[in-house]
């Protein structure tokens, strides 16, 4: 018993120390974005801007698509993303435990397709919604885990890495500047890299002007999605109908 206690006590001290380190990182990261009161007051955010999607294959010429995009996140688990181009309008939405996607022809309202998303997709949308509204704090209170990965070398810098584990294999890796608390970049469990740049301070909260996501497809092609925001609203008035599964009858 004494030997077990001698082993257990240093281990408990180490776990407590790691938790204290991650709490300090989170506190610094939140203070970079705004005060706790300003961050906690954010219950919904609406973004609008331009989406530029490009694909660079291993061989051959790449392609690029430009569209308008609107993104809405609202507590607790509501999300809506609408991408509008000359060829199609694609809307993906989450209504708590239900999610759907509708694709329609902007030139012919009779041509559309509605798909109900599966459990795996719903879990990812819920995790993504939390990540965009919680400002790094409280995942462990909701059943997830925040794991401190310590200092790592990335992009020629010494950064503090935290893993936000939502369960079911859904993990967001956040890399923070240990001096300023700035989020330098993020990675997902699927290998995508997310970088934010620029700033807009709205209601005391710092938001990015641009978000770039890069990933590698199964065929080796690189996918790059850039979103430039020209509108960001905090706590806009929202009609819950925006998130509900649309009727399959003609609108």
Image (spheres, helix red, strand yellow):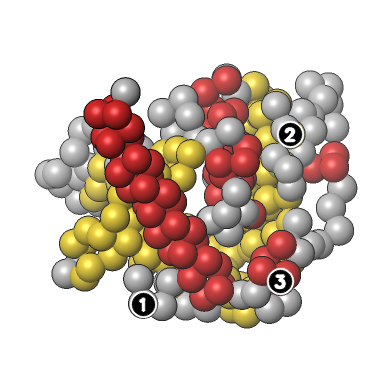
- Toward which corner of the image does residue 98 lie, by quadrant? top right
Q: Is residue 44 above or below residue 11?
A: below
Residue most extreme to the left: 59
**Disc ID at residue 224:** none
Q: Nearer the viewer, mark 3 or mark 1?
A: 1
Name the residue that disc number 2 marks.
95
Tag 3–tag 1 contact (CB < 8 Å): no
Q: Is residue 79 above or below residue 175?
A: above
Q: Which of 210/66 is in front?
A: 210
Q: Secondary structure at mark 2?
A: strand
As measured in the structure, the alpha-carbon distance from the residue carrying label 1 to the one carrying label 2 is 38 Å
- Find residue 38 and name its label: 3
Q: Residue at x 52, y 23 (%)?
A: 120
Residues at discs 2 and 3 in contact (Cβ within 8 Å): no
Q: Is residue 106 visible?
A: no
Q: Foreground: 218 or 187?
A: 187
On the rendered image, what quadrant is the N terminus found in?
top left
Image x and y of residue 211, in percent: 45, 63
Taking the spot 72% from the left edge, 70% from the top edge, the residue there is 37
Horizontal relation, residue 56 to residue 251: left or right? left
Q: Is residue 31 above or below residue 87?
A: below
Instruction: Give the residue number, with chain letter if any, for mark 1.
Output: 179
């Amino acid at each position: 018993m004494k030997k077990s206690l001698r082993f257990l006590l240093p281990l408990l001290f180490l776990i407590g120390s790691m938790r204290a380190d991650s709490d300090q990182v989170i506190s610094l990261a939140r203070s970079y974005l705004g005060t706790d009161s300003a961050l906690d007051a954010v219950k919904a955010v609406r973004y609008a801007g331009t989406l530029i999607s490009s694909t660079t294959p291993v061989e051959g010429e790449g392609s690029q698509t430009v569209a308008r995009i609107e993104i809405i996140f609202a507590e607790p688990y509501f999300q809506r993303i609408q991408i509008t181009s000359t060829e199609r309008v694609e809307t993906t939405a989450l209504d708590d435990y239900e999610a759907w996607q509708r694709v329609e022809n902007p030139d012919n309202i009779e041509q559309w397709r509605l798909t109900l998303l599966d459990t795996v997709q719903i879990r990812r949308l819920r995790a993504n919604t939390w990540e965009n509204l919680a400002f790094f704090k409280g995942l462990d209170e909701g059943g997830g885990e925040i794991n401190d990965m310590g200092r790592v070398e990335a992009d020629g810098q010494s950064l503090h890495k935290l893993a936000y584990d939502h369960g079911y294999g859904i993990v967001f890796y956040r890399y923070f500047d240990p001096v300023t608390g700035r989020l330098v970049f993020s990675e997902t469990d699927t290998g995508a890299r997310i970088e934010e740049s620029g700033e807009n301070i709205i209601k005391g909260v710092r938001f990015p002007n641009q978000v770039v996501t890069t990933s590698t497809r199964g065929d080796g092609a690189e996918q790059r999605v850039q979103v430039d925001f020209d509108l960001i609203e905090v706590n806009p008035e929202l009609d819950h109908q925006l998130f509900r599964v649309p009727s399959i009858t003609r609108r």
